[in-house]
Image (cartoon, rainbow, N blue to C red):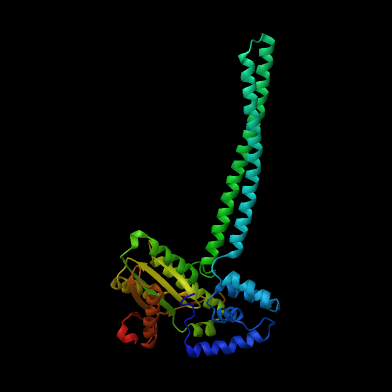
Amino acid sequence: MKNRYKQGKAASAEILRLLLQKMAAHPAAFNPVTYALWYEYITGINSPLSKTMNELLADGQLLTDETVYELYQRHIADGNLDAEQAFKQNMQKVLLNLTRLTEVTGDEAGKFNEGLQKHGEKLAREMDSDMLKSLVGEIAQDTKVMRSSVESLQGKLHESKSEIGRLQEELLNARSEALNDPLTGIFNRRGLEVQMRNLFANPEMQGKYISFLMLDIDFFKKINDGYGHLFGDKVIRVVAEVLKAQVKGQDSVARLGGEEFAVILPDTPQKGAFAVAEHIRQVIEKAKIRRLDKDESVGGVTISIGIAGCQVGADWLATIGNADAALYISKQQGRNRSTIYAPEKAG
């Protein structure tokens, strides 16, 4: 994906060293797919992949070419292929059953129509009361058979409608899981991209200004080292909850990996975005986060924020890159601050 890997040359060189060590212990070939898989795992930018990989590695499983390709298709390639394929297969079964049922009902309808024509021809002749009574009985019997066939079709149609509804719900849930970060419940990077495509396709958004906040938890490694990874995960969840509480309407929040977040603020000028950023920063700074292993709360967690914006229709990926550059300046200037992107400063 565009702008997915944002580590600099020095950081990526260290990642390369680490992933080569990891890859060497497994039989999978050293190809781009394997490299991408381990890169996303080591950097922590793909939470669903990390969860699956951790489970496999904890069980002592070795990654073969087949396993790597399956993981790549499931967690890195666009779309939830398994869910889509299952949905298509189940829908084909439902439609095949309906086709067979309507064919049977169609045959019954044809026979019923032929019977009505014959009964009509009989009625055109002279008939005594016994013959008329017999004809009425035949019509009643044919009608009963046809009604039974129609009722059966209606029942199956109702069942098929319910089944299609269930399949649609399963597909939507699968797609939702593919777009959400499992730790926080907010969008992941893929969800952010889908949200941006939807916003840019919305006619009501055309010509409007959109602002982006890039946020990073300050000294997160020290938090993990000092209090443990469980507490680090809780800090990430708390930050996500604060972000969700501070946005509204079409605003969106995403976790891009590790301790990095993004906020989309449609129809918001930079001045308004700065006010939102500062409010979020202050709320998090004042928060007290309770430890899970001890009866104490930890305060003083801070975040740094970068802000940039563009008109809807412009290169939003480049704008996120600008917000990231502004975030870097916030880090350089002492952290725990918000910075609006300025080309002359970023250069």
Does residue 111 appear to the left or right of 340 in the view shown? right
Q: Residue furthest top?
A: 128
| Camera-nearest residue between 337 and 178 | 178
Residue drawn at 34 percent across, 62 percent down: 205
- Find residue 63 and report its horizontal and vertical position in percent: 68, 78
- Find residue 180 and report its horizontal and vertical position in percent: 51, 67
Is residue 305 among what the camera can see?
no
| Image quarter in which the C terminus is found | bottom left
- Find residue 252 and report its horizontal and vertical position in percent: 42, 66
| Camera-nearest residue between 252 and 91 | 91
Q: Quadrant of residue 319?
A: bottom left
Is residue 198 among what the camera can see?
yes
Residue drawn at 46 percent across, 76 percent down: 2
- Find residue 150 and report its horizontal and vertical position in percent: 62, 34
| Camera-nearest residue between 71 and 55 | 71
Exactly how many numbered labels are in the figure?
A: 0
Q: Quadrant of residue 322?
A: bottom left
Does residue 148 appear to the left or right of 325 in the view shown? right
Is residue 123 depicted above or below 234 in this figure? Answer: above
Residue drawn at 62 percent across, 15 percent down: 123
Does residue 27 appear to the left or right of 74 in the view shown? right
Does residue 214 appear to the left or right of 160 in the view shown? left
